[in-house]
Amino acid sequence: MSMGDEPLYPIAVLIDELKNEDIQLRLNSIRRLPTIARALGEERTRKELIPFLSENNDDVDEVLLAMAEELGAFIPYIGGIEHANVLLPPLETLCTVEETCVREKAVESLCKIGSQMKETDLAESFVPLVKRLAAGEWFTARVSACGLFHIPYPSAPENSKAELRSVYSQLCQDDMPMVRRSAATNLGKFAATMEPAHLKTDIMQIFEDLTQDDQDSVRLLAVEGCAALGKLLEPQDCVKHILPVIVNFSQDKSWRVRYMVANQLYELCEAVGPEPTKSELVPAYVRLLRDNEAEVRIAAAGKVTKFSLILNAELAIQHILPCVKELSSDSSQHVRSALASVIMGMAPVLGKEATTEQLLPIFLSLLKDEFPDVRLSIISKLDQVNQVIGIDLLSQSLLPAIVELAEDRHWRVRLAIIEYIPLLASQLGVGFFDDKLGALCMKWLQDKVYSIRDAAATNLKRLAEEFGPDWALQHIVPQVLDMIKNPHYLHRMTVLRAISLLAPVMGSEITCSKLLPVVVEVSKDRVPNIKFNVAKALQSMTPIVDHTVVESTIRPCLIELSEDPDADVRFFANQAIQAIDNKTTSS
């Protein structure tokens, strides 16, 4: 091939591969568009490549999706932003295809390109594109159009702005629910670009139409618009236009709409101000907490703390707390779990007295719930209560429940308790911990579930860090070392793991005098798994002890293990010896 023919080659390959029956080849070709564009140069890319892509009507969604994504970042390859309008035709075509993800990616790419275009180009090219899509015969084009209005509107001439508002209003009344849904979804974006005067008139009229739509899928998207519009309007306008809609939605016949309200309600409290919140939104929220549908109660229960934070303690105790008590014994475990995951956050809002008298009994009942998810949700947030009620009350009320959960039949509950123990220990203090929880920590080392045993070993290390090496030498090390004689090899492995984790905390002296001799003795165990874990433990101890101890005690033991009949034992022993040699060489 001559030098003059070379620029033709990439486009020829592209055309061939785009027409290939193999989908992967077509996809690879699309992914290579930037490379091909660079080879062609900016002018030929504009005049040959982009028109070719506009005419390419591939029927495979993966290829179209890749094309929509690539074209969004194509401005550098066509000669810069002044030629951006060249990219609009292929993306316009992709906005009309049937597959939703392709359309969404095409809209995203158009928004990316449009946000960089000059004002004159937006008026000449982008606005007509939006109008064409909005007037499309097939609903897919109209759905895509809804996501584009906010790009050209701010810089459009006054007459175009009026036309765009009118067209959007028509889309909100479209015969197809999918188009109205898209219009409801994108209303907040469009409203954010609009002048305050038109926001109160045009947009609020559109919004009102959407809130009265006969399709619940449209109304529930209008709920999202409530929060978005609420942030754009002045508080008095928000009270006038948005508040009545939300109150009506909280009693909507469709549970999906009420569910959306339950999720969004706390955001509106800030927009409308304290008085309307107290008089209108609190009663609406209480209704949602007592809704007939479990899904609505789940959504409302999950927002109980966020809602309480907006109110003062008096209102929360008067209106929200009675509902919380009812929800704590709800027939649905998912409602109780949603409540349990957030209820702890109410303690700082209510204060010590109300927490002790009214919240604490609810915590305790949820801690004893028959479903593990509910118990787990409460355990994970216990520290929030301690900050409010203090350690004495915590120990009297919650500790018996925690001890009970430490032996729960569900291992995930036991695991959650173990992970909470170091925090509890730091709050209880060393004396109280030794009396009540010390024995539990040792018992977990012999649990039937590996994850519990492993977490128990890590827990001992964290306790040693919390209370210091002297305490650990007295209360942890002797009991751990005694367990090395356990007849079950899995438990002996756990002890080795615990020793490896404790050694860095205990320091060189205690490691050499107490821990290392036990590990060397276990190297003669008959189980290969134990022996290669000994090799790992010895390797982890080498940075802690003196070089003389490494050479006199650790190396001879590893050399013996490196001659073991078992291949795994030899491998880990040799790996440890290599690590020691590398350290010696580097020092």
Image: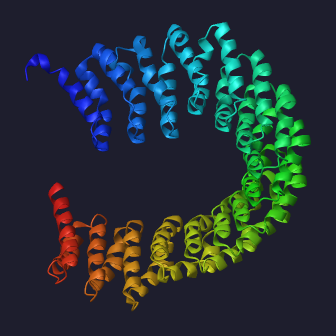
Would you identify the image quadrant in which residue 244 lies? top right
The structure's colour scheme is rainbow
Q: Residue furthest front?
A: 137
Would you identify the image quadrant in which residue 310 lies? top right
Q: Is 217 situated left or right of 582 in this image?
A: right
| In front of the other: 561 or 472 | 561
Residue at 38% over, 67% down: 507
Q: Is residue 473 above or below residue 545?
A: below
**Rendering coords of residue 224 (x, y %):** 71, 38
Q: Is residue 213 above or below residue 557?
A: above
Would you identify the image quadrant in which residue 519 lies? bottom left
Where's the N terminus, which quadrant? top left
Q: Is residue 271 above or below residue 484?
A: above
Where's the C terminus, which quadrant? bottom left
Q: Is residue 242 above or below residue 305?
A: above
Q: Is residue 548 visible?
A: no
Q: Is residue 328 visible?
A: yes
Q: Residue furthest left?
A: 2
**Rendering coords of residue 4 (x, y %):** 12, 16
Residue at 20% over, 65% down: 580
**Rendering coords of residue 12 (x, y %):** 21, 27
| In front of the other: 556 or 402 | 402
Image mark count: 0
Q: Is 312 situated left or right of 411 in this image?
A: right
Residue at 38% over, 14% down: 80
Q: Is 325 situated left or right of 305 in this image?
A: right
| In front of the other: 548 or 560 | 560
**Rendering coords of residue 467 (x, y %):** 53, 68
| In front of the other: 142 or 75 | 142
Q: Is 523 situated left or right of 339 in this image?
A: left
